[in-house]
Every structure is written in C-alpha cells, then in structure tokens.
C-alpha cells in the first residue's frame, strides 16, 4: 500500500443487547487519550498521569490505596487473586462467577489457582455458602481455602448491598481468608446503590479490588486497587509476569482519570441501568416474556420461547444463558431509548406470530 494512501475504515451503525463490551469508547475518554499524547513520559507507570490516577483513587476511597492499571478484566482478576493467596490455596466463588465461567480457565492455567465453586443465590455468595466450601483446613488432600471472590454487579445482574459485602467479609476474615471483588461493572453497582464506592469495598472489608472501566466506556483497561496492604503481596511482580504491565501506561491511566472526572463513570453507568429498567418495563407486559431476575444494574434476564429467540437473533445480537429460552439483554452507556423501542417492537411482532 502506498504510504500516503488514506486508510478507510468501514463501520456499520447497528445496536445490540448482547454485551456492554459491544459499545464504543466514550468521547471524553478518547479526548483524554489525545490530550496525553504529547511529548515523552517515563514508561511502565512512572509517568505523571499514572501518579495523578493514584491521587484520584486515594481521594475516591478516602485513604491510601495501591493503584495498578492493567490491560483487561481477566488480567486484573488473575493478578489480584494471585496477590492474596498462597500456592497451595484455593478461591471460593459462585458457579456463575466470571472468573469461573468466562475467563477461559485463566486463573487455573496462568496462575495455578484452584477455584471452589458454590451455587450462589441469584448470582451472589452468602456467608453460609462460603462456609460450605471453607472446610478441611489443615487436611493436606484438600486445596486450602484462602480467599473469596465476589462479582459486583454479579453475572446475573444483581448487586450486593454494603451490608451483604460486610457480612461476607466478616465471615471470610473470621475463617482466615481474604476478600477480592471483581468490579468489572463496579460503576453500575455504585449507580444502583447510590452510595460511595468505599461503602461496599474498603469500608465493608474488601481486601483487593478489580476496578472496571472497559464495559463502562473505556477503550481498554482496568485497575487493580489494593485496599488492605497487610494481606496483599507482589502485585507489581504478578502484573509483570502475567503480561499485564503496560509500557505506555499513561494512556490507560488517562482513560480512568477521564472516567473519574465529573463522575463520568457513575453517570455512564446510571444511564445504562436506567435503560435496563426501561427495557424491563417495556417487555414485562408482553405475553410470552417472563422477567426471571431482579434488574439491579444494566442487565435484563428473561425467558421467551426458544423459537422466538432464534428469530430475534437473526436481527438482534443478544445472548442466551443456560437454556435456549433464557436470555440476557444488556444495556450500555450509549444505549438509547429508541434502540429499545425498536427491539421491543420486534419482540412483540415475533411473539404475536
């Protein structure tokens, strides 16, 4: 190709309800990336932009915290979990947790972490469920429970309250284990609960946090946040050895700074949540549609006839969950009410025929 030839990128303007990852990048985030693309900065996180992100996170949580930007959510979870368990220990999670179902076995393959799964209640852990897997301490034949991971908001679209997180943390710490929160959709939980993020993280006993950004409008990147340094070790080394150390880290840090500025992260998530509520309200009266789970955040789980699912998926992108008639419809920061209206019109048409 001639180096002066214009590169043309063809995009198709369509909307779907499969995942908030399908959405593009928020314009304010793109602007932030451009703004820091001037001059030189020290690589691997020793830049002034990452230092600013550190200050922003300290202000957000109200105390000194460790801040480690990484490339993606899977990387954040693998790094965070590795930093709070020992080689012979295991991590307790729900059977629907992202670390178990949707990370290609990365915790096991990359970090050698055994996952003990329990059923979950609408996608959430409880102290009783934790105790059901946290046993045989000192028995050499049993992978020793060392940590608990909870997903906020959960893979089933439900949100842990601050009291629920506090109860989980108290139970986990009483058993001598540590608490990790997978916050890929952390902002949606903040918007849903309408409380400061510290209320259900550091103040509720969480030891380490995967702070999500990609699903909420960033180009790429999450941040591992160390909330309790007394039980965390080696995050910087794990980040490097697990291929999550970004050499040009200023561009990742700038994105998260943009999200935290003027509460863009909460405003974007609140819009996604509101669109999910709107979708729920539009479909719940349609014969043949049954809402299966509380719509706490930006996901709607419903049952519709399997043949209707196939017909709708020929036009609209969305996922089935654990059965052909069990669907997940996900809203994002850029979902519009008009998108939902068009989708609902097709649902009504398909179910009517």
Image (tube, helix red, strand yellow):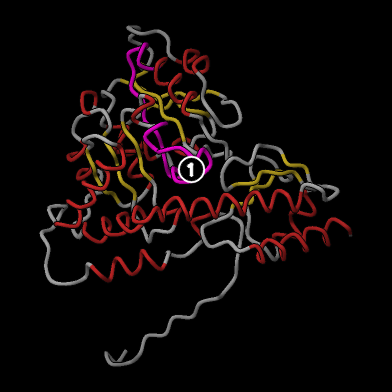
Q: Name the quadrant containing residue 26.
A: bottom left
- 182 inside magenta stretch: yes
Location of residue 254 in the rendering, given as x and y in whole percent from the top left corner: 27, 59
> What secondary structure is found at the residue carrying circle 1?
loop
Crowding at label 1, few (<14), some or many (≥20) Cα neighbours within 10 Å?
Answer: few
Locate residue 6 relative to residue 21 in the image: left or right.
left
**Residue located at (11% from left, 68% from top):** 40
Q: Is residue 319 above or below residue 311?
A: above
Residue at image coords 23%, 36%: 65
What segment carries the magenta color?
172-200
Q: Count up the numbered dots.
A: 1
Query: In front: 199, or 173?
Result: 199
Residue sitting at 36 percent across and 34 percent down?
198
Q: Does the magenta-highlighted stretch encompass residue 198?
A: yes
Measured as percent of width and height from the top left, residue 196 is found at 41, 38
Q: Nearer the viewer, residue 237 or 25?
A: 25
Residue tagged by mark 1?
102
Residue 245: image location, x then y, percent: 22, 50
Q: Is residue 113 above or below residue 303?
A: above
Residue 146, how many percent across, how many down?
34, 20
Q: Is residue 51 above or below residue 322?
A: below
């Amino acid at each position: 190709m001639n180096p002066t030839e214009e590169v043309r990128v063809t995009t198709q303007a369509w909307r779907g309800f499969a995942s908030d990852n399908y959405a593009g990048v928020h314009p304010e985030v793109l602007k932030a990336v451009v703004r820091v693309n001037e001059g030189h900065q020290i690589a691997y996180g020793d830049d002034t932009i990452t230092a600013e992100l550190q200050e922003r996170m300290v202000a957000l949580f109200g105390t000194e915290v460790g801040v480690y930007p990484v490339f993606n959510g899977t990387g954040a979870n693998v790094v965070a979990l590795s930093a709070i368990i020992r080689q012979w220990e295991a991590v307790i999670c729900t059977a629907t947790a992202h670390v178990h179902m949707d990370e290609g076995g990365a915790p096991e393959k990359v970090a050698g972490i055994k996952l003990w799964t329990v059923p979950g209640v609408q996608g959430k852990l409880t102290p009783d469920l934790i105790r059901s897997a946290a046993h045989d301490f000192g028995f050499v034949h049993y992978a020793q429970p060392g940590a608990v991971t909870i997903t906020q908001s959960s893979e089933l679209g439900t949100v842990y309250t601050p009291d629920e997180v506090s109860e989980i943390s108290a139970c986990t710490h009483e058993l001598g284990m540590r608490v990790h929160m997978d916050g890929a959709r952390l902002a949606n939980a903040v918007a849903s609960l309408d409380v400061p993020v510290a209320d259900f993280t550091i103040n509720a006993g969480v030891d380490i946090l995967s702070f999500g950004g990609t699903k909420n409008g960033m180009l790429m990147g999450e941040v591992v946040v160390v909330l309790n340094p007394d039980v965390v070790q080696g995050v910087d080394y794990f980040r490097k050895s697990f291929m999550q150390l970004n050499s040009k880290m200023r561009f990742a840090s700038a994105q998260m700074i943009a999200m935290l500025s003027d509460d863009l992260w909460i405003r974007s998530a609140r819009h996604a949540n509101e669109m999910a509520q709107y979708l729920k309200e539009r479909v719940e009266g349609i014969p043949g549609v049954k809402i299966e789970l509380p719509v706490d955040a930006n996901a709607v789980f419903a049952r519709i006839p399997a043949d209707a699912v196939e017909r709708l998926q020929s036009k609209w992108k969305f996922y089935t969950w654990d059965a052909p008639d069990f669907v997940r419809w996900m809203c994002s920061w850029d979902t519009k009410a008009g998108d939902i209206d068009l989708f609902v019109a097709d649902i009504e048409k398909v179910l009517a025929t």
